[in-house]
C-alpha cells in the first residue's frame, strides 16, 4: 500500500494506474493486477491504510496525555509535528475527502476516522467539546496545508484552548500576538 499511497499523494486518484503503482513499487505490472481486481480496490485499501495510520498515531499521542494543560499541548503537537509535517499524508487526506463526497464506502471509512478521533478526544473532554476540537483540528490542517503563511504552534495552541474553553464555559480570549 505504500506505493499506492505515494501515487495518490503525487498524482491523486486520477493518476492511479496499475502501471504507476507497479513502477513506484518496483514490481512487474502483472503482480499489481494479480493482487488487485480493480483500481477502486487499490484506492480503498490505500485509504484504509492511511486512515488507520493517522488515527492510530492520533490515538497514541492523546493516550500519552494525562492532565488538562498537557492535552492541549499534545493535540497541538499532533497537528504541527505529526500531521502538518507530512505533506504527502495531507495530499492523500484531500483525495480521501474528495472520494468520500462521491462514494458511500469511502464516506463510511471517513466517518470511522472521525469517530476514532472524537473517541480519543472524549478521554479528555465531553463529546460536544471533542467534536468541536476535532473540527478545529481538521480546519487547521486544511489551512496549514494551503496557507501562504504558516500557523505557529503558539497560535495552534491558542485556537485549541479557545475551542476547549469556549465549548466548556462560553468564554473567548484575545488571540496571542504573532511570534
Image: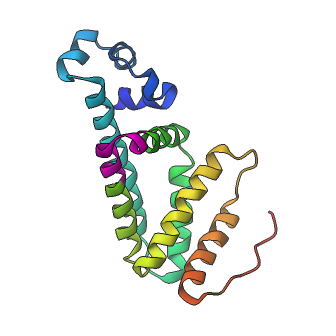
Q: Is residue 45 above or below residue 119?
A: above
The residue nearer to you, when weighing 142 against 68, is 142
Residue 171: x %, y % from top left: 65, 87
Colour convention: rainbow
Count of numbered labels shown in the rendering: 0
The residue nearer to you, when weighing 171 against 179, is 171
The secondary structure that most of the magenta stretch takes on is helix
Q: In this rendering, does residue 115 appear at all? A: yes
Point out the stretch of residues depicted in magenta: 99-110
* Residue found 48% across the figure and 77% down from its top: 129
Q: Is residue 102 above or below residue 122?
A: above
* Residue found 45% across the figure and 45% down from its top: 97
Quarter holding residue 125: bottom left
Q: Is residue 48 above or below residue 164?
A: above
Q: Is residue 114 left or right of residue 105?
A: right
Q: In this rendering, does residue 80 appear at all? A: no
* Residue found 29% across the figure and 29% down from its top: 40
Residue 163: x %, y % from top left: 58, 75
Q: Is residue 58 left or right of residue 35?
A: right
Q: Is residue 146 above or below residue 46?
A: below
> Is 100 within the magenta?
yes
Name the quadrant of the N terminus.
top left
Q: Is residue 114 left or right of residue 163?
A: left
Residue 56: x %, y % from top left: 34, 55
Name the quadrant of the C terminus.
bottom right
Residue 99: x %, y % from top left: 41, 39
> Is 16 within the magenta?
no
Amino acid at each position: 500500500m505504500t506505493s499506492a499511497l505515494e501515487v495518490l499523494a503525487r498524482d491523486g486518484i486520477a493518476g492511479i494506474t496499475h502501471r504507476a503503482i507497479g513502477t513506484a513499487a518496483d514490481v512487474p505490472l502483472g503482480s499489481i493486477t494479480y493482487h488487485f481486481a480493480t483500481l477502486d480496490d487499490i484506492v480503498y485499501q490505500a485509504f484504509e491504510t492511511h486512515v488507520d495510520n493517522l488515527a492510530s498515531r492520533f490515538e497514541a499521542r492523546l493516550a500519552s496525555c494525562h492532565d488538562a494543560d498537557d492535552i492541549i499541548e499534545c493535540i497541538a503537537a499532533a497537528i504541527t509535528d505529526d500531521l502538518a509535517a507530512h505533506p504527502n499524508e495531507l495530499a492523500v487526506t484531500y483525495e480521501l475527502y474528495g472520494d468520500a463526497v462521491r462514494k458511500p464506502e469511502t464516506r463510511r471509512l471517513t466517518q470511522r476516522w472521525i469517530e476514532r478521533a472524537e473517541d480519543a478526544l472524549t478521554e479528555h473532554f465531553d463529546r460536544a467539546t471533542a467534536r468541536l476540537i476535532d473540527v478545529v483540528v481538521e480546519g487547521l490542517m486544511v489551512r496549514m496545508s494551503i496557507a501562504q503563511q504558516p500557523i505557529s504552534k503558539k497560535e495552534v495552541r491558542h485556537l485549541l484552548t479557545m475551542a476547549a474553553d469556549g465549548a466548556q464555559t462560553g468564554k473567548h480570549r484575545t488571540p496571542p500576538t504573532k511570534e
